[in-house]
Image: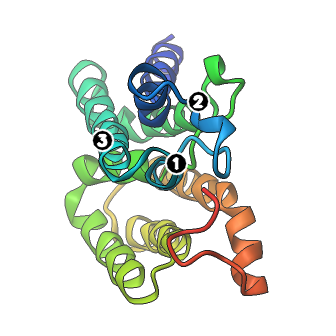
Amino acid sequence: MKYLLIAVISYLIGNISGSFIIGNLFLNKDIRKFGSGNAGTTNAFRVLGQKAGLVTFVIDFFKGIILVLIIRKFFGYEYVPFGILFGVLGHDYPFYMSFKGGKGMAMTLGSLAIFSFKFTIIPYIIWLIIALTFRYISLASIMFFISSIISYGAFGDFSLENKILIAIVCLLGIIRHKSNIKRLLNGNENRIGGKK
């Protein structure tokens, strides 16, 4: 029963889509009908503009933080990775958006940063270096997920179950970037992050 409650709460928090809220409520735009059609931060920057894109990132980042704080307070620290997984699922596949959401980078970053900052800071630095050096946000995001799997799995003092859950969250993030991976391999990915 506890796991079911955590799953439902986390999924609903994940459903709070920054780009969908900003686009529909303030700019009269359904972001899914513009750009790449993805309800993520990069597409929000491209379609809605820099200010709206930044607000989108902040909403998605902080909903990850809020999710972790809620799960940790009412259910316990050990249940947080389970909550993160369902929160990201809610972000990626929101029921009221025909299950077409974002790719989970901002929410995953916010969730992991508050769950364990010391095991998230190196993956974030890797993300930042790649993003600033190569200007491929998609590549930076993929490397963030890969380095997070290594950081949490190889060096984290967590239970095996939670290491597996974190790995699943990150693998989901990589899978959500499969179109970007194809474009990177073909050499036609956009410098600002591709069609997100």
Going from the N terminus, do you reach mark 2 or mark 1 first?
2
Are the residues at dot 1 and dot 3 in contact (C-beta closer than 8 Å)?
A: no
Q: Neighbour class for label 2 at 10 Å: few (<14), some, many (≥20)?
A: some
Taking 22 as reference, is 172 left or right? Answer: right
Q: Secondary structure at mark 3?
A: helix
Q: Position of residue 135 (x, y in %)?
A: 45, 80
Q: Position of residue 54 (x, y in %)?
A: 31, 49
Label drawn at residue 47: 1
Tag 3: amino acid: Val
Q: Secondary structure at mark 2?
A: loop
Are the residues at dot 2 and dot 1 in contact (C-beta closer than 8 Å)?
A: no
Q: Nearer the viewer, residue 147 or 24?
A: 24
Residue at x 55%, y 76% (from the top left corner): 139
Determine if residue 117 is in view: yes
Label drawn at residue 55: 3
Going from the N terminus, do you reach mark 1 or mark 3 first?
1
Are the residues at dot 2 and dot 3 in contact (C-beta closer than 8 Å)?
A: no
Residue at x 64%, y 32% (from the top left corner): 93
**Residue on which the image places disc 2:** 30
Q: Position of residue 167 (x, y in %)?
A: 54, 58
Residue 38, quarter of the rendered image = top right
Quadrant (top left/top right/bottom left/bottom right) for the C terminus? bottom right
Q: Neighbour class for label 1 at 10 Å: few (<14), some, many (≥20)?
A: many
Taking 35 as reference, is 151 left or right? Answer: left
Q: Nearer the viewer, mark 2 or mark 3?
A: 2
